[in-house]
Amino acid sequence: MTSSDFLTCYLCNRSIILGQTKLNCEICGKQLHLECALIFAPSDAPLAQPYFCQACLKETRSYQKFHGAFANNFKVLNELSRCRCQNIEVSDLNIISRSMSKNCFIAFHLNTGSLQKNYDELVNLLSEFATPPHLIAISETWLGVTPNSNISLNNYDFIHKPSITIAGGVGLYVSRDLFFCQIHEYDLEHPDCEDLWINLKINLNISFIIGVIYKHPRKDIIQFTSTISNVLDRLNRDKRLFILLGDWNIDLLGQSTDLATMKYIDTHLANLSLPLITKPTRVTRTSSTLIDNIFTNAINYDLSSFVILTDISDHYPQFCTVSTSIFTRRQNQIFRRDMRNFSIDLYRSDIESSILPISNCQITCDNLNILFDSFVAIIKSSIDAHAPIKPLSRHKTRLLAKPWITKGIRVSVKRKHKMYKTHFKNGTNTQYRTYKTYSNLLAVLINKAKKMYYFNRIKQVSGDIRSTWDLIGRIVNIKKERTPLTAIKTIITDNGSRVNDPLLIANYFNDYFTSIGPNLFEKIPHIEGSFLSNLKNPIKKISFS
């Protein structure tokens, strides 16, 4: 088979092999697979003939006519993006994240309904990941310009945008292993939503535009759709890969009866912005809606998406994985001495036998340094032999992050997760009340354990003012601001000339500061005579009896 036997599908960029069923756009002549073209029609209906691609349909303003019927079919979306959305329990999270490829980018989203209130619950949930998410998007942060409590996560940088209302606000935790910068060219500038955008560098060849968006409920969908359409259009014109996460407050499960929601979905599909979440994300005992979602145009990558069934807030968390195949991540491991097999008697015996040759040597000025170095080397080798330094497991690393969470509390948390499925979702009214009572008591217990931990820590460092303030800083989120150093490119001398040479600039500064002392000395008036002439009735002799 020759290269002329292959064509390229403009949607998925995969080859169209001779003999495969393909379609041609009647206007521009673009070719694509038949299965890729199914995005423009319901799976149980034939494709419209003649066929028009989405770009040409958008040009002729007839997109709604051809594609409105598709909005009801999430199965076709999954087929096109090769993505399967799954509901998972918290107990399954560790196993699933372990099975993921190491070359996998993980993006996580949660509507916290107050980040400060549910911060501890969020940390507990994230600790269940075997591989932590690289990006954590938060909607409804309820934060002011400056958070008044510690909401930092280890190995993450945090940026946020507050809301002008009581509720709302968005934030992003970005792994410090990745390079990113905040951008503003895609800001929605919509009065009924908050949004935050970054350019995230995955590796030397791949970068994503990341957006986290929160649209306030019961606001005009038509106006918001027009705004998001303009942004998606700019992203496509710039040929940028993007991932959009957030609480959109537009129920995709109810779009079959709502024309505004249908138009909103069609706007995303017209720009090849595919929703990865197809399961309900906000479930109560009387309703089930899909208002949180993750949209992306990275359909050429292997994608997976998950909804975590947990009661961290009134919204389920969601996350997606993008297989980048060349992504590498630095592992930030914590090392500790392994004291499990340490015996003080064996250690003391080993030390005594090892330093015996040194203790019998006569110490002189010539061999003092040699003998001391030998002694230090013996102590170090003995410690390493009896208590070797080993990297902590992921499980123990997670435990260090929250030392007030005891073994008993962890057992209670797992029990609560099981009760959520049996009592909250599928139980009777009596079981529901039992679950809520247990959940509230557990929350009170965790808060008391946390307060007691910090109370004891403050007592331990009460005599050390520096350690005390470091501990207070970790509690209330005080961060040391570092002013970046900038090079001085130009100076103006006393005679008005400009100097640009870095060496000359340095010499001018050196001359200025080294001449301050002599110049001040020259300005001090010279006085003749002794200082005694300025003293009135000086005491010339002092005696003690």
Image: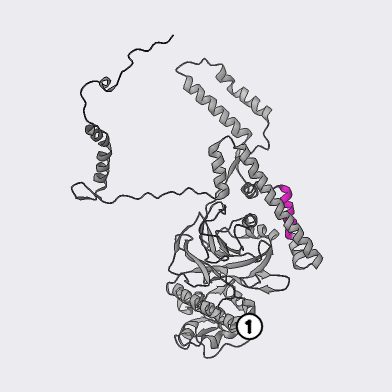
Residue 407 part of the magenta-drawn span: yes
Q: How many marks?
A: 1
In this picture, residue 68 sits left or right of residue 95: left
**Toward which corner of the image does residue 323 lie, by quadrant?**
bottom right
Viewer-closest of 215 and 10: 215
Query: Residue shown at 59%/81% (left/top)?
Result: 71
SS at badge 1: helix
Say which amino acid is labelled 1.
Ser
Which residue position is annotated with label 1?
256
- Which region of the structure is painted magenta? 404-417
Viewer-closest of 71 and 85: 71
Query: How far from the left and from the top, in percent, is residue 92?
Result: 69, 60
**Toward which corner of the image does residue 101 lie, by quadrant?**
bottom right
Q: Residue furthest top?
A: 545
Q: Is residue 528 above or below residue 473?
A: above
Q: Is residue 78 above or below residue 435?
A: below
